[in-house]
Image (cartoon, rainbow, N blue to C red):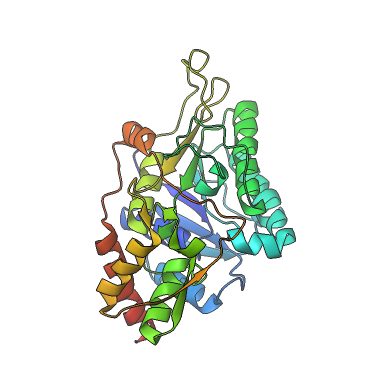
């Protein structure tokens, strides 16, 4: 698509939002970053991400809450696309504080999508999650699956986003793409996620918890591969699927320009293999402690990302050892350890 473009990236101070905004700026796009910089985890990390973005030509930042409809009223009229990554995250946190997920993940999602409709943008791309697949035994997970049994309110809000997006796409003709991310890790990551906790504990000589006694697998996906998928998907807005009536799928639509894609490495590993990669990168053995499985988590995740590859030509390429080593190097540098 010709540029430069002016894109709104919500959640720009967050882990994935920061990386997406940075990649857009590097390729010459103008980016309006929107974030409320909340205290779900250390705001300093968010401020440091923003400092890098603010130092890059073409970036402007609005600190505001997406759950407030007035937030979007103040944004420019010439936004050409929206990449909506802002959300209240955390499967386990949604068990403890479910009420916190409604404003951002439902009201905020609608506000962002309504802004895209009102501005008649060319494409609305939003983040979903592999958690929508729930406990289903069929792996790898494909977009054609119904995914109707989420195990957490967080996953339920993301599934609701997909349904709302389809309705708004059908009503307004807005091209919409939802991206189901599979266990993202990498530099500038979220401190509440396992990869962050693992490196901190191993370096400090403290035990790490292996849920379900380590007997679970995850499709760990490096953040650069996620970003490549987001940008490639944004570059190719969907159309109504003319063949949908003959082969109905939850990932496409015969009534709206709408697509759902998985973004995952397609190489799931068990927790022992994951921990071993950290041990190699850090040069130190981990102390492990077996704990029970959280009720909100699926036993296994495994992406079939072939639909995104066929649509965009982009597939994840980063190996686990390379991705973990790059994260550990960033962690040591950022925290001076």
**Image check: 225 left or right of 295?**
left
| Rendered residue at 52%/27% (across/down) | 257
Tell which of 51 and 259 is nearer to you: 259
Q: Residue 286: image x %, image y %? A: 36, 77
Query: How many numbered circles does the render carry?
Result: 0
Residue 228, compared with residue 167, is above or below; it is below
Residue 86, compared with residue 167, is above or below; it is below
| Rendered residue at 61%/70% (across/down) | 40
Q: Residue 297: image x %, image y %? A: 56, 55
Report whether residue 159 is seen: yes
Query: Which of the 4 image quadrants contains residue 284?
Result: bottom left
| Rendered residue at 35%/68% (across/down) | 275
Q: Residue 49: image x %, image y %? A: 44, 71
**Image check: 75 left or right of 44?**
right
Tell which of 264 and 201 is nearer to you: 201
Q: Residue 108: image x %, image y %? A: 66, 52
Q: Residue furthest right?
A: 99
Report whether residue 25 is seen: no
Q: Quadrant of the C terminus?
A: bottom left
Query: Which of the 4 image quadrants contains residue 295?
Result: bottom right
Query: Which of the 4 image quadrants contains residue 146?
Result: top right
Q: Quadrant of the N terminus?
A: top left
| Rendered residue at 26%/73% (across/down) | 281
Tell which of 12 and 81 is nearer to you: 12
């Amino acid at each position: 698509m010709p540029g430069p473009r002016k894109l709104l990236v919500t959640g720009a101070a967050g882990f994935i939002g920061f990386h997406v905004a940075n990649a857009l700026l590097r390729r010459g796009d103008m980016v309006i970053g929107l974030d409320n910089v909340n205290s779900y985890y250390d705001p300093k990390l968010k401020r440091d991400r923003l400092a890098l973005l603010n130092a890059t030509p073409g970036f402007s930042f609005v600190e505001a809450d997406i759950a407030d409809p007035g937030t979007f009223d103040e944004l420019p009229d010439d936004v050409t696309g929206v990449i909506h990554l802002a959300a209240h995250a955390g499967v386990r946190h949604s068990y403890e504080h479910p009420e916190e997920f409604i404003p951002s993940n439902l009201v905020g999602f609608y506000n962002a999508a309504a802004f895209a409709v009102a501005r008649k943008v060319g494409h609305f791309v939003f983040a979903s999650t592999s958690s929508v697949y729930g406990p289903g035994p069929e792996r790898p997970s494909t977009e054609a699956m119904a995914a109707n049994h989420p195990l957490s309110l967080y996953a339920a809000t993301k599934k609701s986003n997909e349904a709302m997006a389809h309705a708004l796409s059908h009503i307004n003709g807005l091209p919409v793409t939802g991206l189901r991310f599979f266990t993202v890790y990498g530099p500038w990551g979220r401190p509440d996620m396992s990869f962050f906790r693992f490196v901190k504990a191993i370096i400090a000589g403290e035990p790490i918890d292996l849920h379900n006694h380590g007997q679970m697998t995850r499709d760990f996906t490096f953040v650069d591969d996620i970003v490549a998928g987001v940008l490639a998907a944004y570059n190719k807005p969907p159309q109504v699927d003319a063949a949908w009536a003959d082969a109905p799928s939850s990932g496409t639509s015969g009534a709206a320009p709408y697509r759902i894609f998985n973004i995952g490495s397609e190489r799931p590993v068990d927790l022992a293999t994951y921990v071993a990669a950290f041990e190699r990168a850090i040069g130190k053995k981990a102390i492990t402690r077996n704990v029970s499985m959280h009720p909100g988590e699926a036993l296994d995740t495994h992406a079939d990302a072939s639909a995104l590859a066929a649509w965009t030509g982009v597939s994840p390429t980063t190996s686990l050892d390379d991705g973990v080593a790059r994260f550990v190097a960033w962690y040591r540098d950022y925290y001076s350890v």
